[in-house]
Image (cartoon, grey):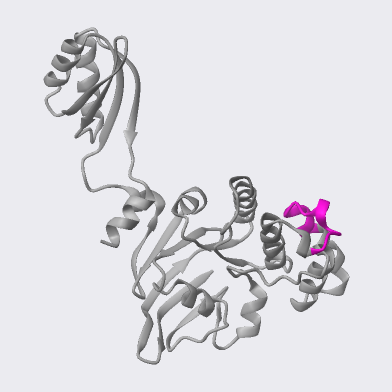
Amino acid sequence: MISVKHISKQFGVCEALKNISFEIPSGEIVGFLGQNGAGKTTLMRILTAYLPPSSGEAFICGENILSHPVGIRRKIGYLPENPPLYSTMTVKNYLRFAARLKDVSVKYEKAQVDHVLSECHLLEVKDHLIATLSKGYKQRVGIAQAIIHEPEVIILDEPTNGLDPVQIQHVRQLIRRLESKRTVIISTHILSEIEQLAQRVLILKKGEIVADNAIEQIVVSDEKKQLFVTVKGKEEMIEQAVKEANDVKQINIKFLEDDLFEVHLENTNNVSHYNQMIQSFLKYQVKIVSMREKKNSLEEAFLKIHK
């Protein structure tokens, strides 16, 4: 679907992208992450055929972005950080205008406008002036114009920037519905957003890709796993039980209430460690109430990469 081969981009003496290569298959949601100035926006502008690379090549749906820029734009839906909306137009008229700009056939124009109004939950505001809409509705209108021509690839730059929690949830739900039909690239500074939406992350640092993995692989720590176990019993029995689990190291025991304690353990990397610990608790008549693993967040992984 998307193939980028050794793309570099220079602006005078500044090298914004350095020998970037990656591939994205059809139907995948990929998050672009990086600090300001990392090269995310430059890369997105190259992929949308609005900015030529200094060297290298990129293909969208098998077509070279340099050889077929107009054709590439027909295959892509792009939502920039500030959606290109005309505040004096109604939502419906603006989407008709967007459909004509994007060469939607006159025969299918009405059907496409009605479809995106429904898909983006804009029917109730279709006759409202864009100037009167909330930020959340404006973002939905921006997404609607990006998908009105049924593009195979959608690129979203900060799609929930400035939205309140309810609006963010609505936009996230909309993006999830796009996944089954299209390849989606999302660039955002909200790392929790990428965790909830994307299957894969590309992290850029100073114009280079420093990580390209599935979300699960990015957040896996190279340290020992940690486990929090809520148990019920006498504290001295809990301590003795943990000591007898040879391969499990106790970090601390925290009193919760009555005879409930939270035991913080580490070095629980495989099933035998779990079994050993459980058997030890049973031996000392300590009841296990709940267990949860501590998982690294994408934010922790991101900060570690940028140290």
The verdict on residue 121 being magenta is: yes
| Total numbered labels | 0
Asked if residue 228 is positioned above or below residue 118 in the image, the reply reads: above
Asked if residue 223 is positioned above or below residue 23 in the image, the reply reads: above
Percent from the top left, x then y, of residue 231?
Answer: 29, 16
The quarter holding residue 145 reads: bottom right
Residue at the image point whose x is 37% and y is 52% from the top: 299
Percent from the top left, x then y, of residue 52?
Answer: 51, 87
Percent from the top left, x then y, of residue 101?
Answer: 76, 78
Query: Quick one: quadrant of the C terminus?
Result: bottom left
The quarter holding residue 275 reads: top left
Lateral position of residue 266 relative to residue 257, left or right:
left
The verdict on residue 194 being magenta is: no
Lateral position of residue 225 relative to residue 84, left or right:
left
Lateral position of residue 141 relative to residue 109, left or right:
left
The range drawn in magenta is: 115-129
Residue at the image point whose x is 58% and y is 60% from the top: 159
Residue at the image point whose x is 29% and y is 10% from the top: 259
Percent from the top left, x then y, of residue 206?
Answer: 34, 74
Identify the residue at the far bottom of this view: 12
